[in-house]
Amino acid sequence: MSTRLTQIAAAVFTLCIASAHAEDEQPKQEEMQKVEVKGSAAKYDARRDDTASKTVVNAEEIQKYGDTSVNDVLKRLPGITIGGAAGRSGGEIRMRGLGAGYTQILINGERAPAGFAIDSLAPDVIERIEVLRAASAEFSTQSIAGTINIVLKKALKPAQHEVKFTEAKSSHSSSPAISLQMSDKKDSTSYSFGGNAWRFMYDRTTPTLETGNDANGVPNVSRASTWQDAGHGDGFNLSPRINWNLDGGDTLTSQSFLNWNRFASTSHSRTETAFGAGPDYDRIDSTYSNHSGFGRTDLNWVHKLEEGAKLDLKAAISDARNTADSLQIGGNNGGPATLVRNVHSDSSEQGFSTQGKYSTPFTFGKPAEGEPDAVEHALSLGWDAGVTQRDDTRIQRDADLPGATPINSDEGFTAKVTRLALFGQDEWNITPLWSIYTGVRWEGLDTRADGGSIDPVQNRSSVLSPLMQTLIKLPNKKDQLRLALTRTYKAPSTAALIPRKFTSTNNSPTEPDRRGNPNLKPELALGLDASFEHYWGEGGLLSASASVRRIENYTHQGLFYQDQRWVSNAINDGRAETRGIELEAKFPVSALMDHAPKLDLRASVSRNWSRVEVVPGPDNRLDQQVPLSATLGVDYKTPDGQLSTGSSFSFRNGGLARLSGTQGGYTSVRRDLDVYALWKLDTQNNLRVAVSNLLAQDYTTESLYSDSNGSLNRTTVANGETTLRVTVETRF
């Protein structure tokens, strides 16, 4: 199947290039003179003009490859990497190569609830993606690596309706999807509605190899496992929005978002031991099912005041629910089952939040005739407050069988998280070429939890974050410099604070039990960012940036041997540092030569370093930080605009990372090659064909443990798959 898909992709790409070449060879017909008028809004570029650094990815870029997951969109953006194997869900979104919560992910400026899968968010409901590499006071400063803000669609063109049908197919999976987008306007009221539904099926086999050595380096363990996993799931997103234009220029907006998912799977694990000790269970048969739903609705009122000031108020409520059931049946040496384990979990999370911001422009000083211009300010003051109530239950029951050691637990808790943030920010346009952004944000968190199986938990923390960014435009109006000094942090999640235990089936140093730590403190970071940007022509950019972060109260996973079992939990342990450089270039070929084809090129490379003081080197990186990543892309459009085609290559380096004195991890290199073609059949219909992961590269991960008694290495290989995706788009 992979070979067939590769041939299809090559044929599609060859057809696109041939069509483009033929178009160029046709004699040019006499064209009517075209006059293009651009207003000031068209000239505005958030990345170029805003003092606070921000990169905006628009809807056209988001939908270019017909992706069904937002993670596939993000992997092509400069400086952003996605963890895990290509084409598989659950990969962690990382900036500066950092995972483990260092990158803040927001939806419409707010954090999603615990357990919400960002990769279940369909790109069709997204209006734009904002990438903030340095923190700003308006958003939470829980963004040591940076912030990615996903803004849902507000409106399409008036009276526009669009439906899309997508079918994706690989050698071991398939996924049909449908999308509907509508918007209209009548008098002072406008609305938009976005809906997506999908289904996916897969059947995969994943091999695992475990090897070990004794204290003298002599091999003493060798066992191989195969894990066959088949599953199916479906879900949908709904995002209705209504906007009212009120008297006096005020606006009132109601926006909601609903996400629902259902999933079920069966798996079979078989282990063969060549020599040494075998696992607790050499065969495990499992079933798993999950239902989850998340809804949020907010009401936003913008009130215009005198002299350009305005008051922006928003209130939101949310509800998230998740249930899961699993059954594991395990045995050894062909004998009867000695493990029958049922686990049921049920969680719900309700939240209320409110935000408010007062902003006003004003001028400081009125210069006399002939003196420099007055200093212009844009001042904002505001708050962000909320309360979340979480109820969580987990019941584990093991059957009392001959030869079994049942582990039963009935663990549940109720948690309440209260947060309050106050902020102020001011942007000064000191001269037409020099602007400064300053801000300060105070955030406080109070987490309280209680349950029958845990001791009461209370964890309070607060962080004061002063922020400064400056933009200096050089006199040639093509070059500019940026500098940012920020204080950011990462607060522990509610789940990380709850001291309940999650039991592993085959307990070992590489598969330990997990437990929360109620004494965790926030990680605090002082950051410095600097960049140089060169603009030319229409859309040409060369950029070079460097950054450094110094992190206190660094958190990592500790490993302990307790009550005859290996247990892992998070602990604060010392200090860490991270540094990085990033180069980016993007430009149309027309910026280099006259009469050039409509060809756009883009490339980026990011190099990251980090060091954890308490972990002995070498390779003592932060949370298996990605040391090197790169992207390369090309897009072509025929002169008549009927055909668009292009390709994107993304590279993510791996390697060994030491997590502690005894633990380590290894990830292989990941290479993603994607191509697409879009045919505009007529004014109402489009055909989009895309092939992702053309290289179909396998992805290898390793968990390592080593102490004075010996070592254990667990290697897992996820097979690579090429996916062909066809989308039919119709406007009506």
Image (tube, rainbow, N blue to C red):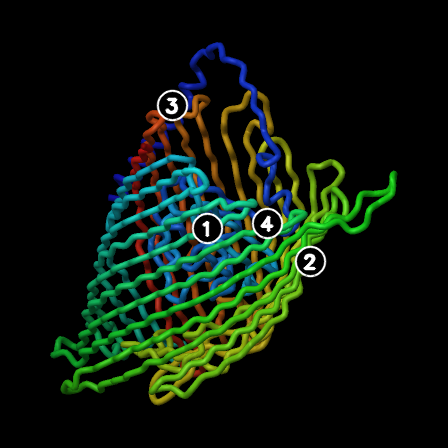
Q: Nearer the viewer, residue 624 or 437?
A: 437
Q: Which label sits in the foreground, 4 or 1?
A: 4
**Of label 4 and label 3, which has the lower sequence position?**
3
Q: Which label sits in the foreground, 4 or 3?
A: 4
| Amino acid on which the number 2 mark rests in the picture | Thr
Instruction: Indicate the quadrant where residue 263 lies.
Output: bottom left
Numbered disc 2: secondary structure: strand
| Amino acid on which the number 1 mark rests in the picture | Thr
**Of label 3 and label 1, which has the lower sequence position?**
3
Label 4 – label 1 distance at C-alpha: 14 Å
Do the residues under discs 3 and 1 have CB atoms within 8 angstroms?
no
**Of label 4 and label 1, which has the lower sequence position?**
1
Q: Which label sits in the foreground, 2 or 4?
A: 4
| Amino acid on which the number 3 mark rests in the picture | Ser
Numbered disc 4: secondary structure: strand
Numbered disc 1: secondary structure: strand
Residue at point 22%, 87% (across, down): 405
The residue under label 3 is 19
Residue at point 31%, 45% (across, down): 722
Q: Which label sits in the foreground, 1 or 2?
A: 1
Callout 2: 10 Å neighbours few (<14), some, many (20+)? Answer: many
Which residue is situated farthest in the bottom direction here?
Answer: 563
Q: In the drawing, what numbered circle is on residue 304?
A: 4
The residue under label 2 is 438
**Of label 1 and label 2, which has the lower sequence position?**
1
The residue under label 1 is 253
**Of label 2 and label 3, which has the lower sequence position?**
3
Residue at point 61%, 60% (across, down): 137
In this picture, residue 167 sits left or right of residue 668: left
Where residue 56 sits in the image (x, y, percent)?
Answer: 53, 46
